Image (cartoon, rainbow, N blue to C red):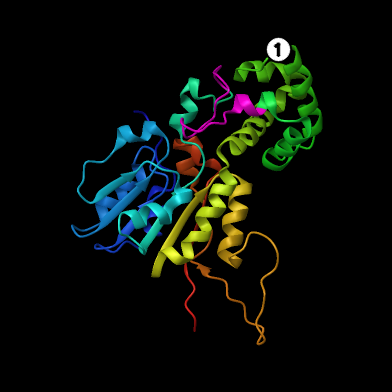
Amino acid sequence: MNYHNPVLLQESVDALAIKEDGVYVDVTFGGGGHSKEILKRLGEQGRLFGFDQDSDALENVIDDARFTLIPENFRYISRFLRFHRVRKVDGVLADLGVSSHQFNEAERGFSTRFNGDLDMRMNQKSKVSAQEIINTYSEEKLANILFMYGELRNSRNLAKTIVEEREKEKIETSFQLKQILKRYLPNAKEHKILAQIFQAIRIEVNEELDVLKEFLEQIPNLLKEDGRLSVISYHSLEDRLVKRFIRTGMFSGELEKDVFGNTSEPLQKVGKLIVPTSQEIKTNNRARSAKLRIATLRVEK
């Protein structure tokens, strides 16, 4: 099955500082690109677990005794690792967002380029699809999603138009939605605005930001003392959460200080933010907005 070239492949796997006998987790298995690179660097005693809730990813399972694919959402990382008798790991890699494979399958409804059913579920078994959100959410709820997750200033107008049009007929396909919102899509910015609209709906369908938060909150208890977290994100909403959690261990609010003025954030960043080279962006368009952040457990001095 045709999956994308992994973005920041060497950099994100280098970030894990792999030990030959270590235990690692690739929480966004997809086409298996990052996993194969991790396995190359592991010795015979090493172990790698992959997570992917998309049934298409099951077709890419790597035939290697050191590898186990867990067909679940990575928000349940600790629970399913415990099932495999693993409580602590040496490193966790996450390549967030939608794979090129998902974008390229017209019937999955992720892409603005193809006409397909408004689906957008990463897990085909989940109950709520994009169609349900577009056709049943209240105008206010739609406006909030488009504003928060799509960062669209005219979210109220977009939501109002969707609600008016769905009363005439059910909105079922991506091109139907595009047609309905045509007046808000000036030629020069059509692609950008549509991408923001689709992003907002997709995040809501898959609860992407909630999943990311739940995942990050488990990392401090999951990593061994010198374990590493390596996260690639593709849009500012995700990156902001990752950056803030690495810096403070929280997603909002201020760090509390003890009586001596010390804080106790669980992680510390490793190195600087890494972005793809212009060469990688040239050969892999998907890399253009990627950001890699690396962290390890904070060691009390």
- Answer with the quarter of the image where residue 206 lies: top right
Outermost bottom residue: 260
Q: Which quadrant of the rendered structure holds the N terminus?
A: top left
Give the camera-side residue of 272 and 193: 193
With 106 as the anchor, is 253 left or right in this view?
A: right
At label 1, the amino acid type is Glu
Give the camera-side residue of 135 and 189: 135
The image position of residue 3, as x and y in percent, is: 39, 33
The image position of residue 74, as x and y in percent, is: 45, 48
With 91 as the anchor, is 119 left or right in this view?
A: right
Outermost top residue: 168
Give the camera-side residue of 70 and 34: 70
Q: Residue at x 67, y 20 (%)?
A: 177
Q: Residue at x 54, y 24 (%)?
A: 109
Q: Which residue is mark 1?
A: 169
Relative vertical location of residue 213 with respect to residue 227 in this rendering, above or below: above
Secondary structure that dominates the magenta span: loop
Q: Is residue 128 shown to the viewer in this render?
A: yes
Relative vertical location of residue 122 with respect to residue 104 in this rendering, above or below: below
Q: Residue at x 36, y 29 (%)?
A: 2
How many neighbours does mark 1 have within 10 angstroms: few (below 14), some (14-19), or many (20 or more)?
Answer: few
Q: Is residue 11 shown to the viewer in this render?
A: no
SS category of the residue bearing label 1 = loop
Q: Is residue 293 magenta?
A: no
Relative vertical location of residue 179 with respect to residue 14 in this rendering, above or below: above
The image position of residue 144, as x and y in percent, is: 74, 39
Q: Which residues are magenta?
A: 113-133
With 35 as the anchor, is 193 left or right in this view?
A: right
Q: Residue at x 49, y 48 (%)?
A: 276
- Answer with the quarter of the image where residue 101 lies: top left
With 287 as the anchor, is 160 left or right in this view?
A: right
